[in-house]
């Protein structure tokens, strides 16, 4: 397994959508001002399926987290919201047909495939799926240096579970904090009603 190095352009496009939809005009201005120049210069030309350095996507994640200062709860909610928006982008494109025929068991087994479609490197491993207790636990590794991605991935998973019809989906992350925003490994626990 190799560490993640690149991500698809649609992830950048969905980050832009998240910022534009969830921030006030002043917040958007401050957000885009803090983006690195090389990332800002690419924005008008980003192509959905092209590969971009993970650092370009991480610049969005970092900016989203930093908008909330040291408030861990608000930063986590914002990062998960961004991940949810990315998940919605996938659901409205390549996952649309697949989700019609998918069970939660198949979805859980396919999380690694979804990640691999959108990233070069990194890995998901299904640790537990208990449909009676309504718990999904997965380990995400090979993400060291991909700032704040561990805060967004549960939002992508939540979007998928909600698209499958599950309600009150909750997420928890072990191994990720604002101080430890670039862990090599994070564990996600997802529950639902």
Image (spheres, rainbow, N blue to C red):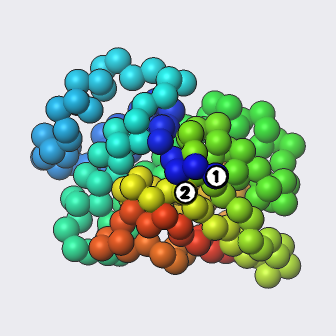
Secondary structure found at label 1: loop
| Whether residue 72 is situated above or below residue 123 in the rendered picture | below
Residue at image coords 40%, 36%: 53
Relative to 109, 19 lies left or right: left
Query: Residue 37 got which mark?
Result: none
Relative to 104, 41 lies left or right: left
Mark 2 or 1 closer to N-term?
A: 1
Residue at image coords 30%, 20%: 44
Secondary structure found at label 2: loop
| Whether residue 5 is situated above or below residue 162 in the rendered picture | above
How would you rate the neighbour count of disc 2 (Cα within 10 Å): few for under 14, some for 14-19, many for 20 or more? some
Residue farthest along the front direction in this orientation: 2
**Residue 77 appears in view:** no
How would you rate the neighbour count of disc 1 (Cα within 10 Å): few for under 14, some for 14-19, many for 20 or more? few
> CB atoms at circles 2 and 1 under 8 Å apart?
yes
Query: Residue 142 got which mark?
Result: 2
x and y, in percent, of residue 67 in the image: 21, 59
x and y, in percent, of residue 123 in the image: 63, 54
Residue position for label 1: 1
x and y, in percent, of residue 40 in the image: 23, 30
């Amino acid at each position: 397994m190799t560490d993640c190095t690149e991500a698809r352009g649609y992830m950048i496009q969905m980050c832009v959508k998240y910022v534009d939809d969830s921030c006030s005009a002043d917040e958007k201005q401050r957000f885009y001002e803090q983006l690195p120049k090389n990332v800002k210069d690419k924005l008008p030309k980003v192509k959905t399926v092209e590969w971009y350095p993970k650092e370009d996507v991480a610049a969005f994640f970092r900016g989203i987290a930093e908008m909330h200062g040291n408030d861990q709860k608000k930063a986590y909610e914002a990062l998960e919201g961004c991940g949810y928006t990315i998940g919605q982008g996938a659901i409205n494109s390549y996952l649309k047909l697949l989700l019609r025929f998918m069970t939660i068991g198949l979805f859980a087994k396919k999380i690694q495939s979804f990640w691999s479609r959108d990233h070069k490197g990194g890995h998901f491993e299904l640790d537990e799926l208990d449909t009676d207790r309504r718990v999904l636990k997965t380990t995400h590794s090979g993400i060291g240096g991909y700032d704040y991605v561990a805060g967004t991935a549960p939002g992508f998973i939540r979007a998928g579970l909600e698209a499958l019809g599950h309600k009150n989906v909750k997420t928890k992350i072990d191994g990720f904090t604002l101080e430890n925003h670039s862990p090599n490994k994070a564990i996600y626990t997802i529950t639902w009603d």
